[in-house]
Image (cartoon, helix red, strand yellow):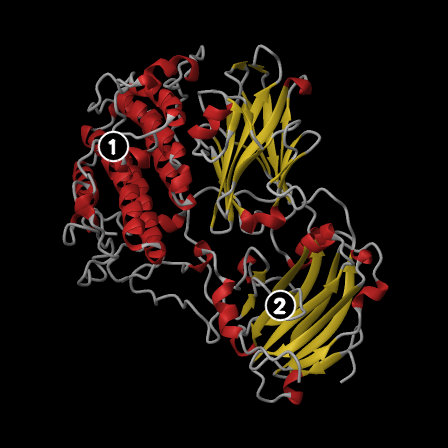
């Protein structure tokens, strides 16, 4: 089941094909022993799951959304596999968890919601907003990782709060 | 007097009919708030983490469709890469100053240039392309020539004649508009015994048609009289003169041996200017097909990614995994084309 | 006015003092040769005093229909008998642009080899952007073509503060690569 179908069709009226595709995701999902975990290993699994979901939903997303969403997962993966990964501050891991499970899917969900609500007329503006949000996410993850490397607690707090304020549990400004 | 062009206004409205091209290059720094979506109708609280395997019948499909490669399918043993991923310099959010992003703006979107320009009322959208204070970009000329969309993707580019290994840590290249439009994009595979593998591609055109090119089954598509995609003697090719008609594509490998073993080797994609992208073809068992590279057309530019997908699948599963679901199948290995 | 021969030029604003923009049209006849039809490509380059394109964004063609300065725009679908048309707002062309060169080339991505010598006819013409009146047409540029894969059709250039048009008809044997090399367009 793709990202969109899960978000908009949570009951999963998916057909046989999607069930087959789901099996690919299950292989990853089942190995996430702690779904809410923010250990580096758990986050890497969530990254992989999100990649599968983005790819599977690519037919329903603007190409720029797919490309930039994958750039975010690339950046997250780089952070999680860097030499500093085992010393990543908890604040970074929490922010990455939020990015993977909430902020990035939320941006895409808001885009689709905007286009579905207002039609093609909204597409241009919604695309601008999606690009802005995904680019911001990517940049913020980089900045968080840098702050973690520098042990800059103030910057960590600021960037983490920025992400939470901008993306967390709020209606995205589309 | 001949050739009076009384219908120019109509013509202009047709010129940029593709939405991607009609978009402005840069979002206005102080764009009006986007239309209010009925966000409350969305299940924003829905967990976005991968759900555990549902107790549906999909479970019994997990075995055949998720082969267990000898290595970890999650690739958790990825090599360490100390360098930061490359990003475009234009991603400057003006926020090395940690104070900047700390100022929320109505709890929705933020203006990261707060220090220079207070957030305007109504919620200022963040502009990554036009620093605040800069004049708003001109969108149209006096006669109505509209600026092309050109969002900064912040992705690596490649020069003519440059060779690039697309590793797991640097898997993406964004071609320029010219690289995306000149000559053909040609994909080939280099293996010890070329008869052991064929390359194919599944594609979606800008008008929403999905189909495949697979040597021996479908030599070209979508229209055999005017193909965009075609099988070549050693791979597949995309006629980039037709790039406006391309939405996205997936390059895949199909092993030809009954064992479905994929030989090890290298996949190469070359441009007219001699840029050369390379990705490894990893030897090993498959379920019938292996995704290799994707390409998405973003505002006239091809963004090519080596997928390094740890999973194989039947061709049908591979197509579905990348969102190509508008294809009919004779069996899981054979599309109806 | 009789058709312009190769090498001939015309001072546009001497003929039309109020001219602010032109439409450059190309009309070719391939005799029904589909591969030729599908791969003929018009490329317009805004060239600086150094003979190079001002930037990659100052090259106008099917995948980049408008120049960065918005002065020059190719129509997605030409009107009338022309196969391709480009509008140039002369008053909007940046001062750094010494000339606007129009090139026709055969795209080489179809897997089938063709050359411009197969063209039955090739005529360029200039219209007034304001109103669409015809200003000038060329002679048939196909007459002297043989194995060329690209052709400089014509150029708009500045002379003594005025715009002039010169018909060229100069061929390349190296296709788009040769054109890109001459004008410094990265491939």
Q: Residue at x 68, y 19 (%)?
A: B195
Q: Residues within 10 Å of mark 1 (few under 14, many from 20)?
A: some
Q: Position of residue C6 (x, y in %)?
A: 80, 72
Q: Is residue C83 visible?
A: yes
* A167 relative to C156, above or below: above
Q: Position of residue B11 (x, y in %)?
A: 52, 69
Mark 1 or mark 2, which is nearer to you? 1
Separation of residues labelled 1 and 2 (CA atoms): 50 Å
Instruction: Return the chain for callout 1.
Output: A
**B336 left or right of C26 in image:** left
Which quadrant of the view contains residue A6? top left
Kindly identify which residue carries mark 2.
C85
Question: Are tags 1 and 2 found on a single chain?
Answer: no
Between B93 and A122, which is closer to the camera in this rendering? A122
Q: Is residue B181 visible?
A: no
Please count the marks in the image: 2
Q: Position of residue B319 (x, y in %)?
A: 48, 29
Mark 1–mark 2 CB contact (< 8 Å): no
* B265 relative to A153, above or below: above
**A44 left or right of C164 in image:** left
Between A68 and B84, which is closer to the camera in this rendering? A68
Residue A10, labelled with which disc? 1
| Image quadrant in which the N terminus of chain B is located | bottom right
Q: Residues within 10 Å of mark 2 (few under 14, many from 20)?
A: many
Instruction: Return the chain for callout 2.
Output: C
Q: Residue at x 47, y 20 (%)?
A: B313
**C8 left or right of C88 in image:** right
Between C179 and B216, which is closer to the camera in this rendering? B216
Give the SS element for disc 1: loop
């Amino acid at each position: 089941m793709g990202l969109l179908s899960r978000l908009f069709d949570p009951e999963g009226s998916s057909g046989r094909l999607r069930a087959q595709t789901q099996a690919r995701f299950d292989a990853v999902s089942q190995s996430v022993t702690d779904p809410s975990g923010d250990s580096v290993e758990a986050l890497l699994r969530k990254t992989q799951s999100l990649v599968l979901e983005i790819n599977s939903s690519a037919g329903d997303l603007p190409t720029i959304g797919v490309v930039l969403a994958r750039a975010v997962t690339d950046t997250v993966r780089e952070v999680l596999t860097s030499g500093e990964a085992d010393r990543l501050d908890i604040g970074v891991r929490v922010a990455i968890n939020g990015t993977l499970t909430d902020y990035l899917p939320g941006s895409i969900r808001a885009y689709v919601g905007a286009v579905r609500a207002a039609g093609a007329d909204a597409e241009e503006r919604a695309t601008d907003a999606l690009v802005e949000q995904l680019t911001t996410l990517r940049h913020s993850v980089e900045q968080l990782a840098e702050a973690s490397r520098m042990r800059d607690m103030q910057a960590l707090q600021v960037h983490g709060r920025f992400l939470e304020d901008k993306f967390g549990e709020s209606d995205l400004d589309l | 007097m001949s050739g009076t062009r009384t219908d120019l206004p109509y013509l202009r409205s047709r010129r940029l009919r593709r939405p991607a091209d009609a978009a402005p290059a840069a979002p206005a720094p102080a764009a009006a708030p986007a239309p209010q979506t009925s966000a409350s109708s969305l299940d924003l609280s829905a967990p976005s983490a991968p759900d555990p395997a549902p107790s549906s019948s999909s479970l019994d499909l997990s075995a055949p469709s998720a082969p267990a490669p000898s290595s970890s399918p999650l690739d958790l043993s990825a090599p360490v890469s100390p360098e930061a991923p490359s990003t475009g310099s234009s991603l400057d959010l003006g926020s090395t100053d940690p104070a900047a992003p700390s100022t929320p703006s109505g709890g929705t979107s933020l203006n990261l240039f707060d220090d220079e320009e207070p957030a305007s009322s109504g919620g200022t959208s963040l502009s990554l392309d036009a620093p605040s204070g800069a004049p708003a970009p001109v969108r149209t000329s006096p006669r109505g020539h509209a600026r092309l969309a050109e969002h900064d993707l912040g992705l690596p580019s490649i020069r003519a004649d440059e060779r690039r290994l697309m590793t797991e840590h640097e898997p993406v290249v964004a071609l320029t508009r010219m690289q995306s439009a000149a000559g053909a994009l040609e994909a080939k595979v280099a293996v010890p015994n070329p008869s052991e593998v064929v390359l194919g591609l599944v594609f979606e055109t800008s008008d929403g048609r999905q189909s495949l090119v697979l040597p021996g089954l479908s030599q070209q598509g979508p229209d055999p009289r005017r193909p965009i995609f075609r099988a070549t003697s050693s791979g597949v090719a995309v006629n980039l003169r037709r790039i406006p008609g391309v939405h996205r594509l997936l390059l895949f490998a199909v092993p030809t041996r009954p064992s479905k073993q994929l030989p090890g080797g290298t996949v190469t994609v070359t441009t007219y200017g001699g840029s050369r992208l390379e990705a490894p073809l990893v030897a090993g068992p498959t379920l019938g097909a292996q995704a290799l590279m994707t390409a998405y057309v973003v505002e006239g530019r091809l963004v090519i990614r080596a997928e390094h997908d740890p999973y194989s699948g039947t061709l049908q599963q591979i197509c579905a995994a990348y969102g190509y679901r508008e294809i009919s199948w004779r069996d899981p290995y054979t599309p109806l084309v | 006015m009789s058709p312009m021969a190769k090498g001939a030029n015309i001072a546009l604003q001497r003929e039309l003092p109020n001219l602010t923009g032109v439409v450059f049209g190309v009309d070719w006849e391939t005799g029904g040769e589909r591969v030729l039809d599908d791969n003929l490509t018009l490329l317009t380059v805004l060239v600086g005093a150094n003979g190079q394109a001002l930037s990659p964004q100052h090259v106008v063609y099917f995948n980049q229909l408008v120049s960065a300065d918005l002065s020059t725009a190719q129509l997605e679908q030409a009107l009338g008998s022309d196969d391709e048309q480009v509008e140039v707002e002369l008053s909007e062309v940046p001062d750094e642009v010494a000339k606007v060169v129009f090139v026709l080339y055969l795209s080489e991505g179809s897997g089938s080899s063709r050359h411009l010598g197969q063209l039955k006819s090739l005529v360029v013409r200039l219209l007034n952007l304001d109103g669409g009146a015809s200003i000038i047409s060329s002679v048939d540029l196909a007459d002297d073509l043989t194995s060329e894969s690209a052709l400089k059709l014509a150029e708009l250039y500045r002379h003594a503060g005025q715009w002039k048009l010169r018909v060229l008809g100069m061929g390349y044997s190296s296709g788009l690569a040769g054109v890109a090399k001459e004008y410094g367009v990265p491939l």
